[in-house]
Image (spheres, helix red, strand yellow):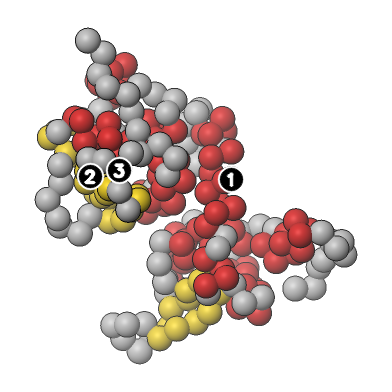
């Protein structure tokens, strides 16, 4: 990269690589899995084609992103390297830090439900409890994601068809508020469609037991 802070400081050198506009959002997309160029364009509304190409080229040169053959065709996909995937920790930290900025809702900002697994994982990692195990469907904008928690940890991904203990459907602001612990399930029941085992939802979201 042509610009540098010129400081022998870990933060400065990290920002030399990932501090430019759109760069960490490219990484966010790739934390969901390898993606084709057109998929990255779809997941980054507003990015100019030449700017996305520049960011991918810079990330490749830095050893953060690599190109791989797609598993199902002759196309090429972009993927995080092992070192690049270590950005999950800092990104999750920023997501948790951003909680006060999210409480006002999306306003006129774009929202893609495909973005949900990254912040959900960041917010729930310290809250979900693993015993007993639970798998809960989270439905936002007609897309279903599964939140699975057990003694081995937490996993969030698109629903793969497995049987769910419960489902919870709500606006993204409500789901994120529950995941951050800012909302109580009892106080927002009219805003949530919950089916199945409520205790599984409380387990996955790290929520307290219902009031009696």
| Few, some or many residues within 10 Å of mark 2 (<14, 14–19, 20+) | some
Secondary structure under tag 2 reads loop
Q: Tell which tag, 1 or 2, sits nearer the viewer.
A: 2
Give the residue displayed 41% in from the left and 48% down from the top.
Answer: 121
| Residue 10 placement (x, y as % from top left) | 76, 60
Residue at the limit of the structure toward the top, as seen here: 212
CA distance separating discs 3 and 1:
24 Å
| Residue 87 placement (x, y as % from top left) | 57, 60
| Residue 24 placement (x, y as % from top left) | 59, 58
Describe residue 6's horizontal placement relative to residue 191 as left or right: right
Position of residue 32 relative to residue 200, above or below, is below
Give the residue displayed 50% in from the left and 28% down from the top.
Answer: 103
**Which of the 4 quarters of the picture holds residue 140?**
top left
Precedes in sequence: disc 3 or disc 1: 1
Disc 2: which residue: 133
| Few, some or many residues within 10 Å of mark 3 (<14, 14–19, 20+) | some
In front of the other: 76 or 66 = 66
Secondary structure under tag 1 reads helix
Disc 3: which residue: 130
Q: Tell which tag, 3 or 1, sits nearer the viewer.
A: 3
């Amino acid at each position: 990269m042509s610009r540098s802070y010129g400081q022998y400081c870990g933060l400065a050198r990290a920002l030399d690589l990932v501090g430019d506009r759109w760069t960490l959002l490219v990484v966010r997309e790739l934390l969901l899995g390898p993606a084709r160029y057109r998929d990255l364009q779809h997941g980054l509304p507003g990015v100019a084609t030449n700017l996305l190409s520049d960011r991918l080229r810079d990330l490749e040169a830095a050893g953060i992103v690599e190109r791989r053959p797609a598993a199902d065709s002759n196309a090429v996909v972009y993927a995080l390297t092992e070192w690049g995937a270590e950005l999950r920790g800092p990104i999750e930290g920023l997501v948790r830090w951003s909680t006060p900025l999210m409480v006002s809702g999306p306003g006129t900002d774009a929202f893609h439900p495909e973005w949900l697994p990254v912040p959900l994982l960041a917010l729930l990692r310290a809250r979900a409890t693993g015993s007993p195990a639970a798998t809960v469907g989270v439905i936002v904008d007609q897309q279903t994601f599964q939140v699975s928690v057990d003694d081995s940890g937490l996993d969030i991904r698109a629903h793969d068809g497995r049987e769910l203990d419960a489902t919870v459907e709500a606006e993204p602001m409500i789901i994120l508020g529950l995941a951050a612990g800012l909302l109580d399930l009892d106080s927002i029941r009219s805003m949530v469609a919950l089916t199945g085992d409520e205790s599984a939802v409380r387990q996955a979201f790290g929520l307290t037991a219902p009031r009696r």
